[in-house]
Amino acid sequence: MDALSQLVATMRTGEPASSLITHHAPWHRSYPPVQGAGIHVILQGSAVLLPSGTEPVALGVGDVVFTPQGAGHALADSATTPLPGVGTAADTAADGDGPTTVLLCGAYGLDRSRVHPMLLELPEYVHLPARLGHHPSLRAAIDLLGREVQDRRPGTDAAIPALLDMLLLFILRAWTDDQDCDEGSGWAAALRDRPVSTALSAIHRNPGHPWTVESLGTEAGLSRAAFARRFAALVGQPPLAYLTWWRLTTAARLLRETDSSLQSVAQRVGYASEFAFANAFKREFGTAPGAYRRRG
């Protein structure tokens, strides 16, 4: 997989969930902070996003709101609709008999112990407004997911998690594409920089390979020194530091999701011995691999 695909596959835990919610104005609903990420899509009508501590954001049909850090927020039909409190645990939905708003909502569990640096770079609230001809893949994924949620048919239970993963990928891709990366740094710039993106894909595709800065530079088509400078400037850490982070992140996922032996996991992520792997894992996680697996 490429870096962005691996990011989604590794960071997410459990099955994503979705629901279709219909409101009639005046309405409001508070969403408390969660240990995950959330998505709202306006399928019909309009709404207002009420982020905690910032200005309201008007939302129209097709607009997407993504909360990568699970920040508390509220949605309402209007910025003037009274709210009992943003981010409270109580169900604060209230409906009237006015115009209808239909929301498609999705939720993802994320492994907060291994949050990818890209997610940390995203703002608390990502708003992707619907624009004609803009991000067609994202619009197609929204349409497919909306149809499955609205009209459950044989196979829907398998289709919805896959479509939610697809939607998350397209949201991250859309955000990356919308960033001005001409003189910037960070993951949006890194994924759009061909040499660095090529090296990242190599690391993610085969973390167990005995990569060196020189061999990664060769993959990227740059000299060792030029590649090391470019990678660190965009990604925010040296190539081998990121490689180690990714190897141990991948190992944690394998321990959590498979029954592979510790020796097998060690070999898959590039450690010559179980002992070397266990030492590196304990330095990173503060616990031995076996204990981490037993904790679930």
Image (tube, rainbow, N blue to C red):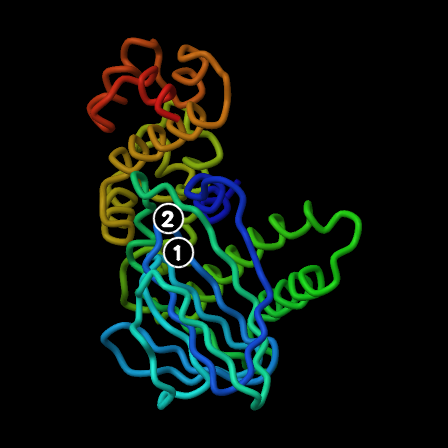
Mark 2 residue crowding within 10 angstroms, few (<14) / some (14–19) / many (20+): many
Vertical placement of 67 versus 240: above or below?
below
User: Residue at the location (76% across, 47% down)?
Assistant: 155
From this viewpoint, which residue is outermost toward the right? 154
Which residue is label 1 attached to? 193
- In percent of width and height, residue 234 lies at 28, 53
Quarter of the rendering containing residue 122 = bottom left
Does the CB distance between marks 1 and 2 fall below 8 Å?
yes
What kind of element bears circle 2? helix
Vertical placement of 108 versus 129: above or below?
above
Vertical placement of 113 versus 294: above or below?
below
Quarter of the rendering containing residue 136 = bottom right
Residue 186 or residue 46, whichever sits in front: 46
Residue 199 or residue 237, whichever sits in front: 237
Name the residue type under label 2.
Val
- In percent of width and height, residue 239 lies at 28, 38
Name the residue type under label 1.
Asp
Which residue is label 2 attached to? 196
Quarter of the rendering containing residue 199 = top left
